[in-house]
Image (spheres, coloured by chain):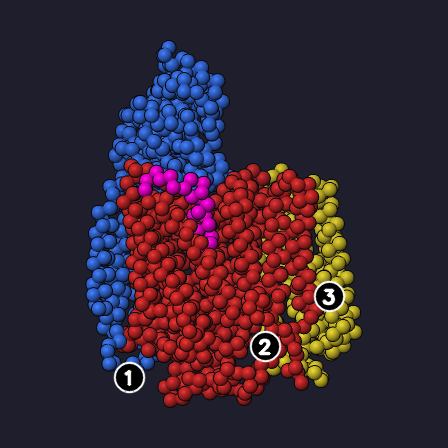
Amino acid sequence: MSYDAHAAGGALPHNPEKATLEGRNKILGFWLFLGCECVLFGTLFAAFITLRNQTNEGPTGFELFDLTTVAIATFLLLTSSLTSVMAIQAMHRQDVRKMQIWLAVTVLLGLGFLGLEIFEFYEYVHHEEFGMTTSAFSSAFYTLVGFHGGHVAFGVIWISILIGQLSVKGLTVVTAPKIYVAGLYWHFIDVVWVFIFTVVYLMGKVAIT
Amino acid sequence: MNMNRWKNVGRLTGFLVTMALLLTGCDGVLDPKGPVAREQLQLINLSFIIMIVVLVIVFGLFFYVLVRFRKRKGQTGIPEQVEGNHKLEIIWTVIPFLLLVIIAVPTVLYTFKFATDYTNDKNAIHVKVTGHQFWWEFEYTDKDLGLITANELVIPVGKKIALELTSADTLHSFWVPQLGGKIDTNPGMINKMYLEADIAAIYQGKCAELCGASHALMNFKVIAKSEADFAAWASQMKAEAVITEEAKEGEAIFTAKCLSCHAVSSDDRGAYPNLDGYAYRTRVAGVHPNDPQAENLRKWLSDTDHVKPGNNMGNQGLTDVEINELIKYLHELK
Amino acid sequence: MAHAHSVKRYRGMMDWLTTVDHKKIGILYLIAGGFFFLIGGLEAILIRIQLMYPENTFVAAHTFNELVTMHGTTMIFFAAMPLIFALMNAVVPLQIGARDVAYPFVNALSYWLFLAGGIILNVSWIFGGAPDAGWTAYVPLSGPDYGGNGVDFYVLGLQIAGLGTLIGGINFLVTIINMRAPGMSFMRMPLFTWTSFITSALILFAFPAITVGLVLLMFDRLFDGNFFNVEAGGNVVLWQHLFWIFGHPEVYILILPAFGVISEVVSTFSSKRLFGYSSMVFATVLIGFLGFMVWVHHMFTVGIGPVANSLFAIATMLIAVPTGIKIFNWIFTMWGGHIRYTTANLFAAGFIPTFVMGGVTGVMLAIPPADFQFHDSYFVVAHFHYVIVGGLVFGLFAALFYWWPKMFGRMLDETLGKITFWFFFLGFHLTFFIQHILGLEGMPRRVFTYLIEDGWHTSNFVSSIGAFAMTIGTLVLLWNIVATSLKPRNAPADPWDGRTLEWAISSPAPEYNFAQTPLVRGLDALWVEKTAGNKEMTPAEPIGPIHMPSPSILPIIMATGIFIAGFGFMYAREGFDNAFINMIFSNYLVAIFGLGITLVCMLLRSLYDDKGFHIEPEEFEDKGVKA
């Protein structure tokens, strides 16, 4: 119950992320933040679904999407969610070394995903003449998928910084909640991607006439 | 002291209500001249009466409590701390709910009724309405009509007018308070609505959606005529206007400077208001009276931006001589 | 030992710029919100002067559109919202027996972001014209094809302020869930805290919709997106949905805290417990929930079809039921009480009939065929001013007079307060009652003028006179505030015979709020102790050093960074005469620089843990918690 997070000292409790009121506040607040992110992405999905057939005589999703690339990207991101769980489990065993390794793997997988996405966008813009300004569909596509990509990029940077903080500060009741909420964040963008994969790519490839 | 205050409030409220009733003019929503507006007013009246009942009850209770339970001099002790009263709470949950049901049933019925689509009804007059910054285009699509007018919608009384509405630029909203409620005109979409007028008269029309600087001046008129007058009007519109020698100069100026935007034959569209039948228009640019002395027309032609700020015509740099000739010509467009 | 951290404590201006104390942030919100309220009010007066006479030329058509846009936007986002946050900051932690909010640093950041947004919006007046597409900014009028760059200021100003509001909402949710004093169960929370809680939840779920809407509009305006561009397949109605999915809950975000204030004030000045407390809580939750289901009633005339219109009509009517419950509960709270007519209670009493009038016109507007006539007419203008001014602003004024001693340690003058009330109350009804009739006579809203033949001049003249009366009331309030601030700081801890925890501590509240966290033993925690004959709250912990968060300059720097980035984005495509300025703007260097500042601040905040400092018992202003 103590406010004196930094003064806890001594042995870490079993759930260091929930040991202090500040830690609990952080985790609760982050869940709420994710609730707000759900509405944010939900709204972006709604906009995308409204505009997905408005291709303005530009390329359609059916013509554009290459499911193989997207499937690989999906695999990378789903795996990274698993590795972030491994990191949290390592945290509960208070094994800082393993934590850092698993977080680093998560970051690398995230970077792989981002690389594929940038490659995909590059292909669309330079070889398919499908840019932000092509059609209402293209604007909606880049905004939705790009927003998610931006979230991944932010997550990659954030988790990298946390790996560094672990080296300097070690696992404490201050760093533990940070790692925990970064894990939550990473799962969230993973879940969003599942929806993007379904609504944007699969439905684009299958449902459009 | 306190009582006096409340008396004053009472007096003022009475004054306000009386004044409000006096001010209620003869046109607008409260004076419908067609079945659509009349049925809408019936719904308004129904809800208004129920709401007045609610107001009377709440206000009665409220003012009674304010006066009866004010703290008096020398009053001591603590009032009884009441947690609540289930019976009362159930009453003021259930009764409002029942009142709402009374409103909800006709609401749903009429919502569907007003969505009736008359666009395929052979007996109706069919008009395509297009909102522009800051004027209205009316295109009569029936085969025997085939006319295009601007800012004045001429209709026969007693007939359903089936409207298909859209916009060429920003949002607008088509509203003729005495004939019926409004509907928005959205670019890229077509909305449908119908109106009907009981008696031959000129009805005020307004744009009700902010659409730019001159939104306030995007007026139009609905001119209801008897069926015979309407037919006469239509054939007159179709007939070629006879331009006398006196207006030939004006015609030449018009052809050189105006015709690229303004059509003068009733089946041409043109980018800007069709001016066929201009001599019969009640308004200049939809706003000020089209007076015989052409005062308002002169004002308009010499400085359109002053009359209707932000309009797309702008100032054409016409000389006074040119304006005089144009006026002669325009007054012969019959 | 751990208490020995030396933390730099600032004085004067620096103290205000670096504060993370919720009470000081509340005051900052009050000052900025009050300032924007005056600006919005000035805009309203200019609007009313222009409409006083037919075909008046006091302001030009385009300027008038700027004025109505700025009046609406300023009043909703930069006056009403911050004033609500001012109250929540000043009162909620005290009411739940907490020492601060959950994230004091984030709280300061919320404030500075709001202020940055408000400044961005308002400097548009001097940077080439204010937004002119209405506070609803309907596309295509707000899109890239029409008007100047005023709407850019609207988009970025709201976006930045909205970010601040969002994190503020999260902050208060966590504060109320996690930081309540021992014994303060949810069903013992004062109603203002409850309404703040629900309002915060509404913020959390409503603001992302406008965030996305603004992003799409920004992409259309700044990066040639096609979301609302009909030629390229865009959809103009999409904006209206996004705006109102946010916009309708926003109405309840505004009014619920006012409901809370009225509940507190009416109960205190009737010396009675709130009648039907649990049904009040239930009604608040229900209103918040239903608030998300009714947005289409702003769009009945868009042409969505009778099925959607009917469903949303019925959902809208349902909201009248919980609202009615509240009204009757307030009246029966007063029933049998000893009602004291202080200024605060006058405003609360004035609120009830006024809000009921706004409520019944709300039900009338919920009937789609009737709304076809009412929509976008002065009837609607009258309706929403009855609920927002007659509801929210009356509530805010009641709250100011009620909590002023707790915020500043001084009592506002009651005589001047009553003068304010009568001018404002009567002026309000004079201004807006007649607008119902103007609407029925066919006067559309947002018209810069009308013709003599329309026959609306008498009513408009009366309406303008009313607006002047409201102005006098507001000026008297300003005078009251100035005069009060010159008086000694001598407000008693409990001037109104209060019932809730904030009245258990001195006025103004000490920096640490409660020297000892109080133990709450029932609804109206302080009243429970009073009736039990106790002189003070029972403490829930022994006296000891109190840990406090450090002040920080980072929040204001972060907001400044975003402020700079906003200008960077807005002017990225502007052609400047100066080649260097052109280069840094057109390559988004300014935008990147601004965002960089903010991100670096975030990094610093993450790297350097805030150790805070301690206030030792010997520094306490008074020992223990008094009742």
Assess whether residue C158 is covered by the magenta stretch: no
Q: Are discs 3 and 1 less than 8 Å apart at CB? A: no
- The main secondary structure of the magenta stretch is helix
Q: Secondary structure at mark 2?
A: strand
Does the image show residue B189? no
Q: Chain letter of disc 1?
A: B
Q: Secondary structure at mark 1?
A: loop
Which chain identifier belongs to the red chain?
Answer: C
Callout in the foreground (2, 1):
2
Q: Which residue is mark 1?
A: B77
Assess whether residue C56 is covered by the magenta stretch: yes
Q: Which residue is mark 3?
A: A161
Q: Which residues are magenta?
A: C53-75
C583 and B174: which is toward the camera: C583
- Quarter of the rendering containing residue C609: bottom right
C354 and A151: which is toward the camera: C354
Which chain identifier belongs to the blue chain?
Answer: B
Decide: is B129 above or below C594: above
For badge 3, the amino acid type reads Ile
Q: Residue at x 36, y 33 (%)?
A: B287
For badge 2, the amino acid type reads Met
